[in-house]
Image: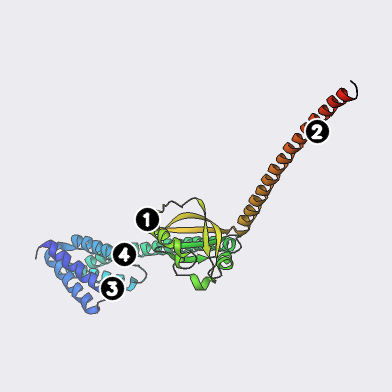
Amino acid sequence: MNREALEGRYEELLGRYFEGEDEKTLFEASEFGKELVVSRIGPDIFADLHSRSLKKILKDKDAFTVERKIVAANDVFLNGLMAYSLNFYGIVETIEAEKKKLEEANNNLLKAIEETRRLNEELELKVMERTGQLEESMERVRAIAATAADAIICLKAPDTIYFWNRKAAEMFGYAEKDVIGKDLHDIIVPERYRGKARDGLKPFFETGTGPAVGKAIEIEGLRIDGTEFPVELSISAMNIRGEWHSTGIIRDITERKKAEADLMEQLDELKRFEKASVGRELRMQTIKEENERLKKKISELEDKFLHP
């Protein structure tokens, strides 16, 4: 095997041990390391190989959970250095020097572990703080939505209700638990509108755009008892983690429509009265003119017959 293959084999054995294999694999790594450092690459290259292998193996791992295995792996390194020292020098001083290197490496690693622990604790605190802020914000939103004067309904693809406030329940007659997770258009949209409305859902959930987005439109809603009533609908789009959602704000405009109808009726009546008044004025003018004409005629007759 060439040097690259030998180094790859050593890294593989350490990796298998960290991935859960037993002490037998660790022993195999130790024996292979001894052979490698004594016969092939020497202590300096072996130290670099061991350090690079551990960094690569620990890259995606939590150092706290594998701390025991790190110590055991460093023992493998120490065994290799000891074998090298005994084989080439046979003196205690060399072993002690290599032990010191290992201890220094271990101390550096422990410092790195401690720093990682500190950073993790700081990160956890920040996450907890942000989570608390988010939960508080969501509670405020829910409280506002719960007491809103209009129905508020949120949808996600393909047509699924996931938010239904108290006013929506009052307006349409469905409790929140009866509609969450169901298709909106099967519940509150009159059948004659469903086909056209569903045609616009697919492009909306892909792009967040549509002809009704950002506008207030008047349509009919469908209550639980099957009756229809006029509503004003405003639709807005929200992008949540890369997916488009829809929020609909719905207002019951039954009273407004009734008031408009009453007003139109009053206007029609006013127009009829105005027309009748004009007609009476014209008739009075005609009568006045006829009266003046008759007065003039009588005066002419008086002059003719009474005062010849």
Measure the C-alpha gap from mark 1 to mark 4: 40 Å
Q: Earlier in the sequence, mark 2 or mark 1?
A: 1
Q: Position of residue 241 (x, y in %)?
A: 40, 58
Of labels 1 and 4, earlier in sequence is 4
- Asked whether, in this view, residue 102 is left or right of residue 6, the answer is right
Q: Nearer the viewer, residue 101 or 241?
A: 241
Horizontal arrangement in the rendering, residue 176 relative to residue 55 (left or right)? right
Distance (Cα) linking label 2 and label 3:
130 Å
In the image: residue 299, left or right of residue 171 = right
Identify the residue at horizontal 70%, vertical 44% (top origin). 276
Q: Determine whether label 1 and label 4 are within 8 Å by CB.
A: no
Q: Which residue is mark 4?
A: 60
For the residues labelled 2 and 1, say whether their Cβ atoms are less than 8 Å apart.
no
- Corner quadrant of residue 64: bottom left
In the rendered view, would you say 137 is above or below 23? Answer: above
Query: Which dot, 3 or 1, sits closer to the camera?
Result: 1
Q: Nearer the viewer, residue 61 or 208?
A: 208
Give the Cα distance between marks 2 and 4: 112 Å
Give the quarter of the image for residue 307: top right
The residue to which callout 1 is attached is: 203
* Amino acid beneath label 3: Ala
Q: Secondary structure at mark 3?
A: helix
Residue bearing the label numbered 2: 291
Quadrant location of the N terminus in the rendered image: bottom left
Which residue lies most toward the top here? 308
From the top left corner, tell me how far across and down residue 286 is, in percent.
74, 35
The residue located at (27%, 73%) in the rendering is 19
